[in-house]
Amino acid sequence: MHAIYTQLCKHLAVVPEIPLKELLPAPIARIIDLNSVGDSLEERLLAVTKAYYDIFEDDRNFRPISGKNPTDIPNFFRSLRFHYPERREYQHSRVTGFNADQTLLEALSILKIDYETLKV
């Protein structure tokens, strides 16, 4: 939505009056606390991912395609695309916890997620 607004303003040669923050959905989780999550890298990355994006919900939404007539598949995808939820990017949240190993910190860095070590 924000890309359309930005391009429309550019096309009309007007300065955008609505701040971009007002056009974007609020982050699902501003702070993601990993203290209650398991110790494995996989468990921690899954917790971070699920805070932004429920891959299991996508799986549930896509599974019906296996029973579709091939001619109905384009409309099925079109419907998914038009009703797909808007999401913020990872960098709009912060991950916290008491301890993070180097591998987790590197993975979060690649995703542009800030990590804050909590003090005991």
Image (cartoon, grey):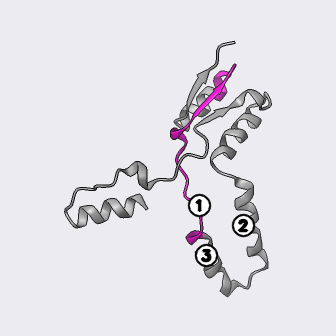
Q: Three-letter amino acid code at disc 2? A: Asn
Residue 52 marker: none
Residue at coordinates 52% horizontally, 36% vertically from top-left? 112
Camera-side residue of 74 and 9 = 9
What is the CA distance from the residue labelled 2 to the residue labelled 1? Answer: 12 Å
Answer whether labels 2 and 1 touch (C-beta < 8 Å).
no
Above/below status of 58 relative to 49: below
The residue that label 1 is drawn on is 85
Quadrant of the drawing holding the C terminus: top right
What is the CA distance from the residue labelled 2 to the residue labelled 3? Answer: 11 Å
The residue that label 2 is drawn on is 61
Camera-side residue of 18 and 78 = 18
**Of callouts 2 and 1, the N-terminal one:** 2
Camera-side residue of 102 and 114 = 114
Image quarter for residue 72?
A: bottom right
Which stretch appears magenta? 81-104
Q: Is residue 61 magenta?
A: no
The residue that label 3 is drawn on is 79
Above/below status of 3 relative to 79: above
Q: Residue 32 appears at what percent x and percent y?
A: 65, 35
Q: Is residue 93 magenta?
A: yes
| Within-10-Å neighbours for mark 1: few <14, some 14–19, many 20+ | few
What is the CA distance from the residue labelled 3 to the residue labelled 1? Answer: 12 Å
Above/below status of 92 relative to 40: below
Image quarter for residue 31?
A: top right
Q: Three-letter amino acid code at disc 1? A: Pro
Q: Residue 11 appears at what percent x and percent y?
A: 24, 66
Image quarter for residue 90?
A: top right
User: Which residue occupies the extreme top position in the image?
Assistant: 120
SS class, disc 1: loop
Residue at coordinates 43% horizontally, 62% vertically from top-left? 1
